[in-house]
Amino acid sequence: MPIVRNLGRAASQLLQSSGCGCGVSLVPVRAIGVSPRQVASDASFHSVTFSESDHPRVLITGGLGQLGVGLAKLLRKRFGKNNVILSDIRKPADNVFYSGPFIFADILDYKNLREIVVNNRITWLFHYSALLSAVGEANVPLARAVNITGLHNVLDIAAEHNLRLFVPSTIGAFGPTSPRDPTPDLCIQRPRTIYGVSKVHAELMGEYYHYRYGLDFRCLRYPGIISADSQPGGGTTDYAVKIFHDAMKTGKFKCYLRPDTRLPMMYIDDCLKATLEIMEAPAEALTMRTYNINAMSFTPEELAQEVQKYVPELQITYSVDQVRQAIADSWPMNFDDSNARRDWGWKHDYDLPELVTTMFSYLGSDSRIAQAN
Ligand SMILES: NC(=O)c1ccc[n+]([C@@H]2O[C@H](COP(=O)([O-])OP(=O)(O)OC[C@H]3O[C@@H](n4cnc5c(N)ncnc54)[C@H](O)[C@@H]3O)[C@@H](O)[C@H]2O)c1
Ligand SMILES: C[C@@H](O)[C@H](N)C(=O)O
């Protein structure tokens, strides 16, 4: 790290001595002059820091997806309702709108995003906006814009305004040439989806901004996340959410992955707990800025067996979707999260049986639950 910091200093000195004659000095993040958005040093910045006793002021982008509303709920419990602003480009449901501050924020609109951060004195940003793996393959230009250009906007704003920035990555940041069983934190990453490529880019850019500009970037690679009260946004792991809803509604489930497709998965409460934990971890504890986290790994067949303990009449058929199967076949089967466990004490609470019990109790399955347990 010292070498990289020195490199940064050297680059700044080089720029200062280059006699460019522009007449305005630039804030550090722009100093190497690679960004189209150069900001004069006399611009009105709110470079916010907060003491330990203060609560962070939080913005969540892409907050109306599968994970954002739950994250807002957790953070509001911790930091107070009005300190956590949920944002998205979609219209929130009534219960979300009335549960705490909500604001329109398109991450592709740099100026608007910057204004929100400044006007609300944001100190922590959770960047959840993204197009997931399957929908990303269906619309590569949009995925590229949202996942890459949007990330650039967020990174610049976070660096300029001294924010602590969380960006989730994914098991999808690995590819067919990565070790798959288990997949460690540091190994070959050559994903074959625009989603995976954009997430590797996010990991690398965030780490670069950390070493180059001191940005407090923190990143977790999530497994497939399973939740009861929010719907997934078009990923490859979505079958593991849909099976519960279909079991409850129709007693029939058509799975788009082969029965033996093993993927790492996690219950949403564990995912959100890990997210808050890494954001609160002391910087000295973090030997890395991007960590794998894991809870369990299972196949559709194994999940179905567990679900059938609650809905024994559930009928499962398999109709493989080639796109999502190819994606799943290139992803980790088991995730090695030993660094997270060692550095900041990561520990999951939900294994497969607890996950299934919790999902059914959430979905109010009492009437259908068999006495099998
Ligand atoms: N859900 C999972 O299983 C999972 C696993 C690994 C990583 N992640 C990551 O966690 C984050 C949240 O995932 P999710 O499941 O809630 O995603 P999601 O697809 O359910 O939600 C993404 C949200 O981003 C919003 N969005 C799209 N374009 C936008 C734009 N231009 N400006 C602002 N918002 C925009 C969408 O409206 C949507 O509400 C994503 O970055 C995702 O990659 C999720
Ligand atoms: C794994 C994750 O990133 C997402 N659920 C997807 O399948 O695309």
Image (cartoon, helix red, strand yellow):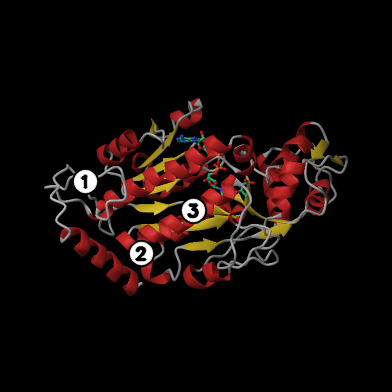
Q: Which residue is mark 2?
A: 211
**What residue sits 36% from the left and 58% below the top?**
209
- Residue 311, relative to residue 167: is it above or below? above
Which mark identifies residue 201? 3
Q: Amino acid at mark 1?
A: His
Q: Is mark 1 within 8 Å of ligand 1?
A: no
In the shown orientation, is residue 190 left or right of residue 123? Answer: right
In the shown orientation, is residue 295 left or right of residue 247? Answer: left
Residue 123 on image: x %, y %: 31, 49
Q: Amino acid at mark 3?
A: His
Q: Amino acid at mark 2?
A: Tyr
Residue 157 on image: x %, y %: 32, 46
Q: Residues within 10 Å of mark 2 (few under 14, many from 20)?
A: some
Q: Which residue is mark 1?
A: 46
**What residue sits 80% from the left and 51% below the top?**
306
Q: Are marks 2 and 3 in contact (CB under 8 Å)?
A: no
In the shown orientation, is residue 366 left or right of residue 37? Answer: right
